[in-house]
Image (cartoon, coloured by chain):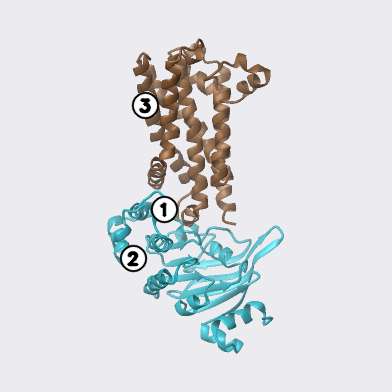
Amino acid sequence: MRTLNFAKRNFKEISRDPLSLIFAVILPLFLLFIFQQFDIPNESYKLENFTPGIVIFGFSFITMFTAMLISKDRTTSLLIRLGVSPMRPMEYILGYMLSIVPVILVQNILFFILAIILGLEFSINIIFSIGLSVVIAILFIAAGIIIGSISSEKASSGISSILVQLVCFTSGMYFPREILGKFFGTLCEYLPFESCLAILKGVMNNNTESIEMRNIIIFLIYTVVLLAVSVIVFKRKMVSDNN
Amino acid sequence: MLAIETKDLTKRYKDKTAVNGINLKINQGELFALLGTNGAGKTTTIKMLSTLIIPTDGQIKINGSDIEKDRQKIKKILNVSPQETAIAPNLSVKENLEFMAGVYQIRNKKEKTDELIKSFNLDQVLNQKAKTLSGGWQRKVSIAISLINEPEILFLDEPTLGLDVIARKELWSVIEKLKGKVTIILTTHYMEEAEHLSDRIGIMAKGNLIATGTSRELIEKTGAENFEDAFVKIATGGEL
């Protein structure tokens, strides 16, 4: 119950920040729309490839909001008040995570509605990929918890914007890995964003054969490690912030 | 009965002792002011007493229960209004009260929030977002929130810091109404505040609790003309 109460409060905080809505929903929607107006001779920009790319791109802003929310709570001493209360650290983490789920669902539903209007064929796989995207988002939320726990309110948006750029360049949403050169190509392979996109794209297009075992392993390793690190870092920061 | 009892309470950081073996006894219903210069150890003491940080050494008993063994039980009977205003900025005053009622799983949530709204005159700002309130109102809301679980022990860390004289006097009247019903531990830099509100005063310097007593006792003890002079004499060891 405490977790749900905390999640409800977090959701209100996020949804009442107009910048959150602009970056998480309107900007990706605009990009999805505008890139379909150009006839770009590249597979990446076909609706069936670009829509899941936009979903992953939207998640990078989820990292930013989570980080900003946590760092703000630390700055305003709200976490001191909550630290005195009977709430336990896991209730905070779950509360932060659950509050993001409605944002993810709204994001995805709107992205897919626009994509369908622009010509994407509706299939049951779109519903599956919306469900899967909630699982993929755990990785991005965990990254946000880590950034928000270790940085100040101002720094958290800056650090998160690095992740936004990394998603753009290394997920393959804009350019295939082959044209990025050796260094960035290798970076794409070892960072999780390309794998997240490959998994989502495979499920959405009913083309699960395109998902390599490497994609699943990389995604799982990053998600588990970031989740574990986020719990440890958050717990430690709650104590050290008060010391 | 004692609300708070500490025995050799100590907090050490790597190369610094923030609180050095203090022994403190605070009675139930008492308003105890903790004074000291910056860095004297007041906030660290409050954080240890309110379960936020773990002491390096020593013992804390809250209403007779050991803070280490009965942490979760003790958390339910205390609350804090921190130095910085700790409210959710994008939530309205009403939502802030409801949110904290949820944190403490208050059963009669509506009844309790209505009671606080009435006693703190929050009607006029009830639907206003917390971040748009003046400093005085934010502090008032912060104290109201800290009463949501009907705490037996309340920690007020510099509750009137930075407020104008009217807002400060308003908060004094709020605190005065709580006297006797709730055990209050208050830290402040304002001597007149401590003198006006508290039953007893403790003075800390360099991590040590160097004097306790009523303001009159401390004035008499130092032979000073007023409480501010008495505090300066005690805190500086008579150097000033």
Mark 2 belongs to which amino acid?
Answer: Phe
**Chain drawn cyan in the picture:** B
Residue B108 appears at what percent x and percent y? 29, 57
Residue B131, label in figure: 1
- Residue drawn at 39 percent across, 21 percent down: A128
In the rendered image, is residue B80 in sight? yes
Pick out the residue farthest to the top: A41
In the rendered image, is residue A234 in sight? no
Residue B87 appears at what percent x and percent y? 43, 55
Query: Could you say which quadrant of the image residue B227 lies in?
Result: bottom right
- Residue beneath disc 2: B120
On screen, residue B21 versus residue B180, left or right, reads: right
Residue B39 versus residue B125: which sits nearer the camera?
B125
Q: Could you tell me how far apart the alpha carbons at marks 3 and 1 are, in whole angstroms?
A: 30 Å
Secondary structure under the numbered disc 3 in the rendered image: helix
Mark 3 crowdedness (10 Å alpha carbons): few <14, some 14-19, many ≥20: some
Q: Could you tell me how far apart the alpha carbons at marks 2 and 1 are, in whole angstroms?
A: 18 Å
On screen, residue A202 versus residue B223, left or right, reads: left
**Chain drawn brown in the picture:** A
Mark 3 belongs to which amino acid?
Answer: Leu
Secondary structure under the numbered disc 1 in the rendered image: helix
On screen, residue A81 versus residue A161, left or right, reads: left
- Residue beneath disc 3: A110
Pick out the residue farthest to the right: B15
